């Protein structure tokens, strides 16, 4: 049992309240991703769970135990930092074994556990190197190794992939997902990248302005965004959102939305008519930017590279049942 | 319950205790003792007697004046020469790094050693300086024996000893100026002279502030060089506050000596604090 | 290198030779002369080199006082530096990591400590009260107190460049404050520690004023004090005086040769930040 339960969690820095009451239940073994724009409070929330930051009010339970005021080391957590926080003066071996050595465990036990972790993470060949002699992906693995060796109930990840290049990031996403499958431990993962959230999470928590906007499985959030913010945040390119008169004309109370991939284009006829402003060709598909009459800017995504050219007049329609209205 | 910080205040205790006991306590106590007749046997309250004496006795007042003259003279020379040397030693000339070492080395040498060395070199008849001057037909002065020259001679030696540090600070300051400025200035048709005055001098300002303040503090507090070279003589001609403080202490006038200390403290505070604020403000305006 | 830079370099080296090198050559030459030969200081090599004899004479003066002085100076320097490095780094660490009203006020006190001249006679009075006057322990504590400003300033600015993530990783690993400081932070401070050791060692070794006030007595002599004391004795033996100057110039020269880079880093960092 290693559920993480947050109840009425709040945090203020002086007069500024950055976490405005968060209630959340992360089930045991779940891969939970906190996602949101910068400044939404996701990192602060993670740091409060770790104990590095103290909440102003509210309660944190890990594995059924109230750890609200416990020291970080007593919470059964391990954390992987954005910068990896590897000790530059220590070898990979010493980095991984550092926590055990602080706890003054016998040398033989440390060596045995380090060897075991190194085997799991395929770091055996690098044990005597210093961190600066490692590649980005290897450093990442050492940072994970340092967490695994603590045998925690919960892993905390603070934007661990943001320092890697695109190719390596894709590879590490897969490695982390596999690691989670193998260990079956609860993981809480913070990122600003909705692609990471969508691809890795069992459960996504979308945060905005210190509050939870929505909690749900990735496809849940994609199909049924609870708020316009979630609708706009999840999915790429962003959902087309319209407010006010325009939205009301389309049958919404205040906001109307349609995803670019749910807009069909035709040369003959459709709900909206507009002029093509700009075309981004990505190979497999193309993003068409349209200025639609009575609607404003509209983005559509079409497969392949169908011949749309700037200046051309096109007709667009939403796919039935994929529109969202608030 | 508040959890304990990983950066506990008690880390400040060992250093804080030593600093408080051996520096702060005597500093605070000096304000009281400067108001007493104090000798090795007793301390009696005397009001402002000591201070009055300091400014009425010519040989004590002279020390205050000399301190100011010495500090301004050495600080000015170190600033100007330091900047010129730094520009020279960053221009890529032959033997540049060797020259930097040579100019800097005296900074590390014992001040007493330097003082005694120059005391011999400046001997009016047998010193190497006057012997060399005589060889080219100049009748060298009594560097340390002429009362109107002694203080200046010591100041020159202090500049000889300390200009390397000023140069070093200026070299570090020059290294922070982007070459783009010089290239832009050259494209605008600036001469080397104009580049120096319009680019280097304004942009190296933070280093100038540092050099002026460091050398002023050093000049105001200087004791060992003067003591090794002249002991404040001839007469009281080259006495500065620091040497007066020592002499009065030696003579058993502890209260008077401490008053000198307080005067030195006030002099530094009154000179450096406004100057630092002024220089830093102008820096912030850049 | 353009011709201009070559010519300017040669001229500069000639001038620097006259102004900065000749005085040191004079020291070396005179230190090798006989007393009669040395009576007039001039720029000629000794008629007869008696370097070793002069060295032995200086060392033997006043019952090997110079050796005692070297021992005392070493004890003071090593003791003071050990204290400065550990206590100073602790202060710089907490001051940088914990930005509170208290640490900001203390930082101001540290800065003013760089400026204020020590109140010497009250310090002597205090040392007498706590029985540390004329003791090496007292002198060590004084040197620590006077060197803290520079040390704390340098450590504080260096620690700002060490990511806090490292502390936090160690906190999560269960490190106590002392463990984090000694096992994570202090090892990472090595470059700046070397700088501090070198710069402060030279300053304390070369210090004349404070031993003069706080450490009188023949059994407490330090290297600088010996030189000053011998001056009167060597008045007619300038060869020995200059040998003595040479002997106390050698340690900083060696340090300079080996730690040039660290000295430059420390002097400019301390200066520019101060």
Image (spheres, coloured by chain):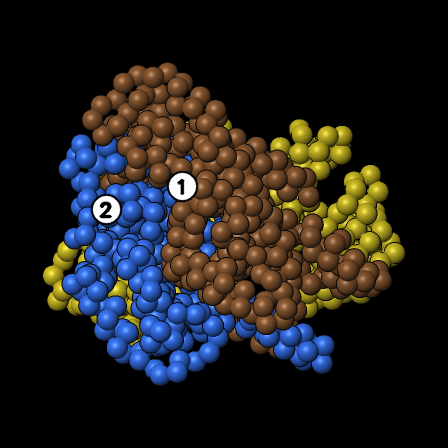
Chain colours: A yellow, B brown, C blue
Location of residue A261 in the rendering, given as x and y in whole percent from the top left corner: 66, 53
| Mark 2 secondary-structure assignment | loop
Residue depicted at x 60% and y 39%: B280
Which of the 4 quarters of the picture holds residue A37? top right
Location of residue A18 in the rendering, given as x and y in whole percent from the top left corner: 47, 32
Residue assigned mark 1: B243
Proximity of marks 1 and 2: CB atoms separated by less than 8 Å: no
Residue depicted at x 45% and y 74%: C25
Location of residue C120 in the rendering, given as x and y in whole percent from the top left corner: 32, 37
* Quadrant of image for the C terminus of chain A: top right
Closest to the observer, A116 or A15: A15
Name the subunit of mark 2. Answer: C
Residue depicted at x 56% and y 45%: B148
Closest to the observer, B210 or B128: B128
Residue assigned mark 2: C215
Name the subunit of mark 1. Answer: B
Direction from residue C171 to residue A82 in the image, left or right: right
Rendered position, A26 above or below A198:
above
């Amino acid at each position: 049992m290693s559920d993480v339960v947050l109840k009425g969690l709040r945090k203020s820095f002086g007069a500024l309240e950055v976490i405005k009451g968060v209630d959340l239940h992360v089930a045991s073994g779940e891969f939970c991703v906190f996602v949101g724009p910068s400044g939404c409070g996701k990192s602060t929330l993670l740091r409060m769970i770790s104990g590095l930051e103290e909440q102003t009010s509210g309660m944190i339970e890990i594995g059924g135990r109230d750890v609200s005021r416990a020291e970080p080391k007593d919470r059964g957590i391990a954390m992987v930092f954005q910068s990896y926080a590897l000790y530059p003066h220590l070898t990979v071996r010493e980095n991984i074994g550092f926590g055990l050595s602080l706890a003054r465990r016998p040398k033989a036990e440390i060596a045995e556990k380090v060897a075991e972790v190194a085997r799991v993470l395929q770091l055996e060949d690098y044990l005597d190197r210093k961190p600066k002699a490692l590649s980005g992906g290897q450093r990442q693995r050492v940072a994970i190794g340092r967490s695994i060796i603590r045998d925690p109930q919960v892993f905390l990840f603070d934007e661990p992939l943001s320092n890697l290049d695109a190719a390596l990031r894709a590879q590490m996403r897969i490695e982390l997902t596999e690691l989670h499958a193998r260990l079956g431990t609860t993981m809480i993962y913070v990122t600003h990248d909705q692609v990471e959230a969508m691809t890795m999470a069992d459960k996504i928590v979308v945060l905005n302005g210190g509050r939870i906007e929505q909690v749900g499985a990735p496809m849940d959030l994609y199909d049924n965004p609870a708020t316009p913010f979630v609708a706009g945040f999840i999915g790429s390119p962003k959902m087309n959102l319209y407010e006010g008169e325009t939205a009301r004309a389309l049958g919404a109370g205040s906001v109307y939305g349609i995803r670019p991939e749910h807009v069909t284009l035709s040369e003959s006829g459709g709900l909206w008519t507009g002029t093509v402003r700009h075309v981004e060709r990505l190979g497999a598909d193309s993003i068409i930017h349209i200025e639609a009459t009575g609607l404003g800017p509209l983005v559509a995504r079409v497969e392949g590279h169908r011949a749309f050219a700037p200046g051309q007049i096109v007709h667009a329609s939403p796919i039935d049942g994929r529109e969202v209205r608030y | 319950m508040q959890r304990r910080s990983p950066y506990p205040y008690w880390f400040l205790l060992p250093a804080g205790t030593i600093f408080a006991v051996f520096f702060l306590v005597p500093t605070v106590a000096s304000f009281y003792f400067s108001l007493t007749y104090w000798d090795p046997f007793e301390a009696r309250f005397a009001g402002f007697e000591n201070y009055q004496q300091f400014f009425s006795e010519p040989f004590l007042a002279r020390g205050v004046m000399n301190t100011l003259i010495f500090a301004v003279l050495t600080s000015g020379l170190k600033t100007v020469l330091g900047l010129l040397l730094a520009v020279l030693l960053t221009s890529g000339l032959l033997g540049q790094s060797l020259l930097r070492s040579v100019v800097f080395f005296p900074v590390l040498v014992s001040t007493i050693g330097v003082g005694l060395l120059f005391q011999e070199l400046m001997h009016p008849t047998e010193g190497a300086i006057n012997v060399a001057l005589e060889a080219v037909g100049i009748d060298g002065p009594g560097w340390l024996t002429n009362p109107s020259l002694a203080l200046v001679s010591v100041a020159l030696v202090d500049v000889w000893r300390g200009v390397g540090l000023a140069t070093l600070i200026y070299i570090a300051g020059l290294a922070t100026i982007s070459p783009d400025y010089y290239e832009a200035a050259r494209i605008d048709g600036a001469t080397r002279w104009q580049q120096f005055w319009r680019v280097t001098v304004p942009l190296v300002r933070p280093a100038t502030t540092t050099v002026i303040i460091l050398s002023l503090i050093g000049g105001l507090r200087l004791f060992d060089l003067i003591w090794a070279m002249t002991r404040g003589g001839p007469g009281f001609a080259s006495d500065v506050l620091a040497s007066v403080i020592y002499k009065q202490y030696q003579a058993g006038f502890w209260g008077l000596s401490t008053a000198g200390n307080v005067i030195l403290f006030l002099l530094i505070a009154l000179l450096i604090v406004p100057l630092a604020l002024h220089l830093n403000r102008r820096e912030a305006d850049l | 290198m353009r011709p201009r830079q070559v010519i300017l370099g040669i001229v500069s080296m000639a001038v620097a030779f006259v102004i900065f090198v000749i005085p040191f050559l004079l020291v070396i030459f005179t230190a090798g002369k006989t007393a009669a030969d040395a009576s007039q200081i001039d720029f000629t090599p000794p008629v007869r080199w008696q370097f070793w004899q002069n060295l032995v004479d200086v060392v033997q003066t006043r019952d090997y006082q110079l050796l005692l002085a070297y021992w005392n100076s070493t004890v003071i320097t090593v003791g003071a530096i050990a204290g400065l490095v550990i206590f100073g780094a602790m202060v710089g660490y907490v001051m940088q990591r914990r930005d509170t009203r208290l640490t900001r006020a203390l930082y101001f006190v540290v800065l003013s400590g760089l400026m204020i001249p020590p109140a010497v006679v009250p310090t002597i009075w205090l040392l007498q009260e706590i029985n540390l006057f004329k003791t090496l322990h007292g002198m060590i504590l004084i040197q620590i107190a006077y060197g803290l400003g520079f040390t704390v300033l340098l450590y504080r600015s260096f620690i700002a460049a060490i990511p806090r993530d490292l502390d936090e990783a160690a906190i999560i690993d269960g490190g106590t404050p002392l463990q984090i400081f000694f096992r994570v932070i202090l090892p990472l401070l090595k470059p700046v520690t070397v700088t501090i050791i070198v710069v402060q060692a030279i300053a304390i070794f070369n210090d004349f004023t404070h031993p003069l006030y706080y450490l009188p007595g023949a059994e407490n002599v330090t290297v600088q004090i010996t030189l000053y004391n011998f001056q009167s004795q060597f008045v007619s033996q300038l060869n020995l005086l200059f040998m003595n100057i040479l002997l106390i110039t050698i340690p900083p020269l060696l340090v300079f040769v080996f730690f040039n880079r660290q000295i430059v880093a420390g002097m400019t960092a301390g200066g520019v930040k101060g």
